[in-house]
Image (cartoon, rainbow, N blue to C red):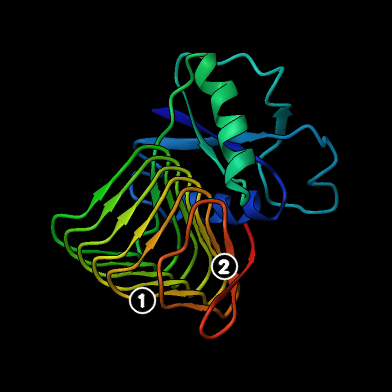
Amino acid sequence: MKHLIIIGARGAGRETFLTATKSFGYGHEFDIKGFLDGKTDALDGLPGYPPILSSVESYQVEEDDVFVCALGDPKWRKHYADIILNKSGKFITLIDKTARIGRNAKIGNGCIIRDYAMISCDVNIGDYTYIQPFAVIGHDSVVGNYCHLNTYAFMGGYSSMGDMAIIHTRGTLIPHKKMGMGAIIGAGSVAMTNVKCETTVVGIPAKRIKG
């Protein structure tokens, strides 16, 4: 039995705890040991959660530990995952049992796939990507490492996200379009053209506001 440790005990961490309890493997492949968070009082007044064990920086990885990083910002997710990886920590992928995974879909290591996410056939998802409830990824799409798809985000068929890209709540990337590394589609926005690296677009159709 492995012992899951969740990096981050704030909102996303608590939501990830609930996802872990409903994920494939819970109770027979892994249990939940606790959280890592530098804010030691993050769970004060919030009963029913496992303890905060320590900060990420001070935690000493044990033999049967496994990890997920429950931070919404891809840059911080990578930062803290790298700290654990440099201590030889191992990550696992959590997939909520209500998520729908299509034929030939490939999902990398350290991902979190939450309630009712829909991943179509022949999709390729990289490592350490966080997919929120009801997000939809169309057939033959490619999602990079450390990406974030927020609730009701949508990717059309044959679209792609570069590493550390973000689609915010109800954001849409239409079929065959690409997001570069670190690109962002704002909440409720519809990207009808490619989105360049480190560029933020908002609106319908989405227009560049940053980058």
Q: Position of residue 89 (x, y in %)?
A: 48, 20
Position above or below: 170 against 55? below
Nearest the viewer among 78 and 133 is 78
Q: Residues within 10 Å of mark 1 (few under 14, many from 20)?
A: many
Residue drawn at x 57%, y 75% is 207
Residue drawn at x 73%, y 34% is 37
Label pair 2/1, CB-CB below 8 angstroms: no
Q: Quadrant of the C terminus?
A: bottom right
Q: Is residue 30 left or right of residue 69?
A: left
Q: Position of residue 155 (x, y in %)?
A: 36, 70
Nearest the viewer among 1 and 58 is 58
Residue drawn at x 61%, y 31% is 79
All told, the count of numbered labels is 2
Query: Which corner quadrant of the image does residue 42 belong to?
Result: top right
Position above or below: 103 against 60? below
User: What kind of element bears circle 2?
Assistant: loop
The image's mark for residue 139 is none
User: What kind of element bears circle 1?
Assistant: loop
Q: Position of residue 179 (x, y in %)?
A: 42, 59
Q: Is residue 127 left or right of residue 69?
A: left
Q: Nearer the viewer, mark 2 or mark 1?
A: 1
Q: Amino acid at mark 2?
A: His
Query: In this figure, which residue is indicated by the disc labeled 2?
Result: 168
Nearest the viewer among 120 and 58 is 120
Q: Residues within 10 Å of mark 2 (few under 14, many from 20)?
A: many
- Name which of mark 2 and mark 1 comes first in the sequence: 2
Query: In this figure, which residue is indicated by the disc labeled 1?
Result: 174
Q: Position of residue 59 (x, y in %)?
A: 66, 18
Instruction: Specify the farthest residue to the bottom.
Output: 204
Q: CA distance from mark 2 to mark 1?
A: 14 Å
Q: Amino acid at mark 1?
A: Ile
